[in-house]
Image (cartoon, rainbow, N blue to C red):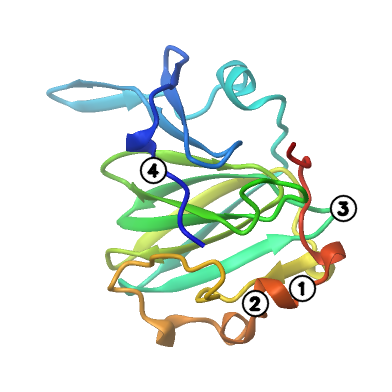
Amino acid sequence: MEAACTIAELPCSTYCGAMTFAPMGIAGLLEITPRRLSDERGYFAELYRVDAFARAAGDVAFVQENESLSERAGTLRGLHFQSEPHAQGKLVRCTAGALFDVAVDLRPGSPTFGQWAGVELSAANGRQLWIPAGFAHGFCTLEPRTVITYKVTAYYSAAHDKGIAWDDPDIAVAWPDIADPATLSPKDRVQPQLAQLSGDLIGGGQPCA
């Protein structure tokens, strides 16, 4: 499937004082840009505010925060999700290096089911991506020693840990040319295609009209 439209093609965003929340081409996804107050010493930024986030994305409670380091540029991770009742929303940011972050809509009844959206996150641009429950998530690093951190709305559950092939032709993510399949984990090398998953193993989040 083709990617949903990029943020540059969308006319509206919500400014909440300390940060801007901009919708992407798939309902629910938000690109978040914290406002940096800079001077000769550097900058200060508010990265997360409960009140601003609730206005833009609804009431969300984070229960766990994760971090991973990828030594090589071109490292692929994903596409990962957790099935119900442990589906996870993720607030993703890059704290070192740069990466191409991808979300795939798995929500039942969604008009964009199976479509993807992507955005570059880096330590330099400071952007974040809000991915509601009901999406698969993956990324490709663009620089060596890239670090990704993300808050989640449900605890990790090995029994509900699922995935989809990074190169599923029905999803057709346009990965960066640097993406190297040799960097995939043993688990991600054998993930099924979306069409092979039964309905009870995908979805989560809220059905879309």
Residue 195, placed above or below residue 33: below
Instruction: Residue 193: give its label.
Output: 2
Q: Residue 193: give x, y in percent of width and height.
A: 65, 77
Q: Residue 58: give x, y in percent of width and height.
A: 68, 25
Number of residues whose C-alpha sits closer than 10 Å to that of mark 3, classed few (under 14), some (14–19) or many (20 or more): few
- Find numbered disc 1 in the image and state the secondary structure of the residue it sits on: loop
Number of residues whose C-alpha sits closer than 10 Å to that of mark 4, classed few (under 14), some (14–19) or many (20 or more): some
Instruction: Residue 85: give its label.
Output: 3
Q: Name the residue rendered at 61%, 49% in the picture.
A: 112
- Name the residue type under label 4: Thr
Q: Earlier in the sequence, mark 4 or mark 1?
A: 4
Question: For this view, does 133 lie left or right of residue 174?
Answer: right
Q: Earlier in the sequence, mark 4 or mark 3?
A: 4
Of 195 and 136, which appears nearest the observer? 195
Of 202 and 68, which appears nearest the observer? 202
Q: Nearer the viewer, mark 1 or mark 3?
A: 1
Q: Name the residue rendered at 38%, 67% in the picture.
A: 175
Number of residues whose C-alpha sits closer than 10 Å to that of mark 1, classed few (under 14), some (14–19) or many (20 or more): few
Q: Nearer the viewer, mark 4 or mark 3?
A: 4
Name the residue beneath numbered marker 4: 6
Instruction: Residue 37: give its label.
Output: none
- Name the residue type under label 1: Leu
Q: Earlier in the sequence, mark 1 or mark 3?
A: 3
- Find numbered disc 3 in the image and state the secondary structure of the residue it sits on: loop
Q: Nearer the viewer, mark 2 or mark 3?
A: 2
Q: Residue 50: give x, y in percent of width and height.
A: 62, 21
- Name the residue type under label 2: Gln
Name the residue beneath numbered marker 1: 197
Q: Residue 160: give x, y in percent of width and height.
A: 81, 65
